[in-house]
Amino acid sequence: MTHRRPLVTLVSAAAALVLGALGLGAVAGPASAQQPGYAAGSTSAEAWERSADESESVPDTQDGVGPMANPIVTDIYTADPATLVVDGTAYLFTGRDEAASGQQQFVMREWHAFSSHSPSNDPDAWEHHGAVLSLDTFAWAGANAWASEVVEGPDGRFYWFVSVDGNTDNGWMNIGVAVADNPLGPYRDAIGGPLISDSTPNSSGLNIDPTVFIDDDGEIYLYWGSYWEPRAVRLQDSMTALDGQVFEPAGLTGFWEAPWLFERDGVYYLAYAANSGGDCVTDGAYACIRYATANSPAGPWTHRGVVLGQVSSTTNHPAIMEFGDQWFMVYHTADAPGGGNFRRSVAIDELFFNSDGTMRKVVQTP
């Protein structure tokens, strides 16, 4: 189910030349391409054998060491955070990394939920609600419960947009949608098939990492993409159908993957992972978080700089949340005991804005 990847390799090479011409520095190769489990092999039957070791794939504990700040979850490995605030409660949704120690590929079958009435990087501030969505929710899904986002729709229900590998097409990753009456579920498949797939005209080279934003005028935007190919489209009020043509947003300098769209004081922000430029990474196998601003959620976008530096895992994934009078950057690292590129853990730190609306670079706390 990887028929598009040879073409993507050619496109990626061309993109690397363009990035070099823009002065973003040489690209040593996509962060994910240097991880065998990301672009190859992660849908194999072997990866889906739930062995005793994998089912117990949780961070090791250290004698005499109690709860500490970041990462905020240490009893399982968590990745690809997404946030939602409803009625004074902050919700955190993550994927779960289940790779065994030393396993060099992603093993992800389910998404977990956490909540807090006072979010911080104190692990005790968060209540774990367990796995509230899994691949089993989607009859057409085959593997890879990757990055996602939950948003409240115009009808007051909650829509969970997920990256998942379908088993009924000849493509690779797709974007599906689940729906529930409560942020914590129970969720059901809202469509019965993918919303975005390789067969969607003008889709990305890798259809992952959805972020959905509903503007004050009611317009709904879906952004997603990887392999240097950001994509966007408007959604119908149903949240389960496209409203117009897929387009490539302009101005997202160095975009690699993992977009996150939000608005503050009339300015639209798009944070995203990038893996090139001396201001971003020390090695093209890693990623920082750049961001851009615009006067419209459709762009065009103006690159503003790096808001989160390289982390200890090769992948990097932002979620940005306003809670009360505070803003937070949520991301993942490899910092939990026993962690690594395929055993990641979610972290959270405060995010600050300058008086001109630009974002200060987040200080990562251990």
Image (cartoon, rainbow, N blue to C red):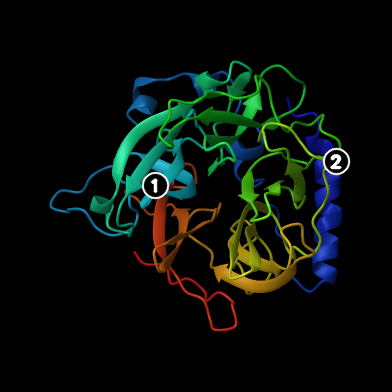
State the residue position of label 2: 202
Give the percent coordinates (x, y) of residue 254: 73, 63
As displayed, is residue 90 above or below residue 114? below
Q: Quadrant of the image for the N terminus? A: top right
Q: Quadrant of the image for the C terminus? A: bottom left
Neighbours of disc 2 within 10 Å: few (<14), some (14-19), many (20+): few
- What is the number of the mark on residue 339? 1
Judge depth for marks 2 and 1 and give the one in front: 2
Give the percent coordinates (x, y) of residue 175: 66, 34
Neighbours of disc 1 within 10 Å: few (<14), some (14-19), many (20+): many
As displayed, is residue 366 above or below residue 115? below
As displayed, is residue 45 above or below residue 232? above
User: Left or right: 211 with respect to 58?
Assistant: right
Give the percent coordinates (x, y) of residue 101: 40, 37
Residue name at image x 39 percent, y 47 percent: 339
Callout 2 amino acid: Asn
Residue name at image x 63 percent, y 69 percent: 266
Front residue of this view, candidates 24 and 164: 164
| SS at badge 2 | loop
Give the percent coordinates (x, y) of residue 39: 66, 38
| SS at badge 1 | loop
Callout 1 amino acid: Gly
Residue 93 found in image quarter: top left
